[in-house]
Amino acid sequence: MNRFPIPSIGRAAAVLVLAGVAPAKGAEPAGGVPGEWLSRWSGGRTVGMGGAYVAWAQEPIAVHGLSFAVPGRKLPSFGLTVLSLSSGEFEKTNNLNEPLGSFHEGDLAFLFSTAKSLSSRFSVGTNLKVVRQSIDEFDGSGFGVDLGVLYNLTQAVRIGASVQNIGGPGIKLRNTEETWPTEIRGGVAAPILGGRGLVSAEIHHVPGPGTSVRGGTEYWVHPLMALRFGYQSAPAGGFSYRVAPDARLDYGVTTQELGVIHRFGISYRFGGFHAKSQARPEVFSPVGERPVTKFELHAQTKAETAKWWLEIEDEAGAAVRRFGGPGAPPAHVMWDGKNETGLPLPDGIYRYRLVVVDAEGRELAGHEQTVEIATSGPRGSIPVLVN
């Protein structure tokens, strides 16, 4: 795994990820190392970021499987991930190259994860994993442990590190046991452009292949769509599309020695810690039948909520109105389409997002959404008929 799924998850989440390979050429320095399939293969968002995600772990991941995580308030958070990889059928021959049928190779892993925030800045997490490998009629199993930490240098800049395969797993298929090498990752990540973007960099070391550097960036070009670019011994990229406030489709693509790798993922978040806001109606007219819009607000924080704010920005990114105060947010606030000085704002699309901060300094931001002021009515042309 190239990140720990639990320490900073704000809500319960489930992720389903599928992968595909198309013929092409590529390079991957960790190829051939025992257990490299589990270390390298990850979700669409991580792939699009070039694999540089150890410092910004915010969601569970899976490959050909399912991942589920539940955040804890007083108790530790926990998660379960099931991963599977199968080769399909290969031709089986003897020493004389005579056909003997077919065989396949398969890998399966179960990861039981737990994590705990020791302070508002420092979190630790661990994976206990059970892995199984089979080749033809031979199979074997093993156990291993991963350890990860996250530390917030500032409110925006976060560093992360992980040590994987501590004391195993070791899998014996025939006569020789293969022990997975201990992998070390360290990285830094920071949001940019008011939280709409993210940059991340990571160093990954594996005994044998050596050290590699990864990097990636993400930018939400629209509240519903994000684009990603990265590099992990080859260019990578991808996108996300939010089909609902809590449901998202992810896609990532990169190359390695097997060819072009595609990742498709579906994620859904529910319950847990969150900050949600919704404008009703989403289009209103201060001089029409719908003179105001109501922002419905709801938040759940790990510790007691200390303060909140809802900031409204125009299409240029300039703040035009701000609501906020101490404690938890109210059930709703009303907006009449005016700025802080009470002047009417022009027609257009405006962005808004609810942000809450708990008593221990943790900041939780909701999804950025849009609301529209439309006073001019529908646009178009009226046909004129001439007799």
Image (cartoon, grey):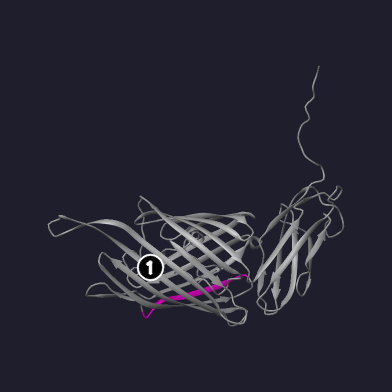
Q: Position of residue 233 (x, y in %)?
A: 41, 60
Indicate left or right for 92 with 55 as reference.
left
Q: Is 159 located above or below residue 229 in the figure?
A: below
Q: Residue at x 63, y 69 (%)?
A: 271
Quadrant in which the N terminus is drawn: bottom left
Q: Residue at x 25, y 66 (%)?
A: 137
Residue type, numbered disc 1: Leu
Q: Secondary structure at mark 1?
A: strand
Q: Nearer the viewer, residue 181 or 171?
A: 171
Q: Which residue position is annotated with label 1?
A: 108
Q: Position of residue 310 (x, y in %)?
A: 75, 64
User: Is residue 62 at least partly visible in the picture?
Assistant: no
Q: Nearer the viewer, residue 3 or 208?
A: 3
Q: Residue furthest left?
A: 96
Q: Nearer the viewer, residue 200 or 324?
A: 324
Q: Position of residue 371 (x, y in %)?
A: 74, 53
Q: Does the magenta run of residues contain 229?
A: no
Q: Main secondary structure of the magenta part?
A: strand
Indicate left or right for 23 with 12 as reference.
left
The residue stretch that appears in magenta: 156-167
Q: Residue at x 67, y 77 (%)?
A: 361
Indicate left or right for 219 with 281 as reference.
left
Q: Does the magenta run of residues contain 163?
A: yes
Q: Position of residue 210 (x, y in %)?
A: 36, 69
Indicate left or right for 38 with 95 as reference.
right
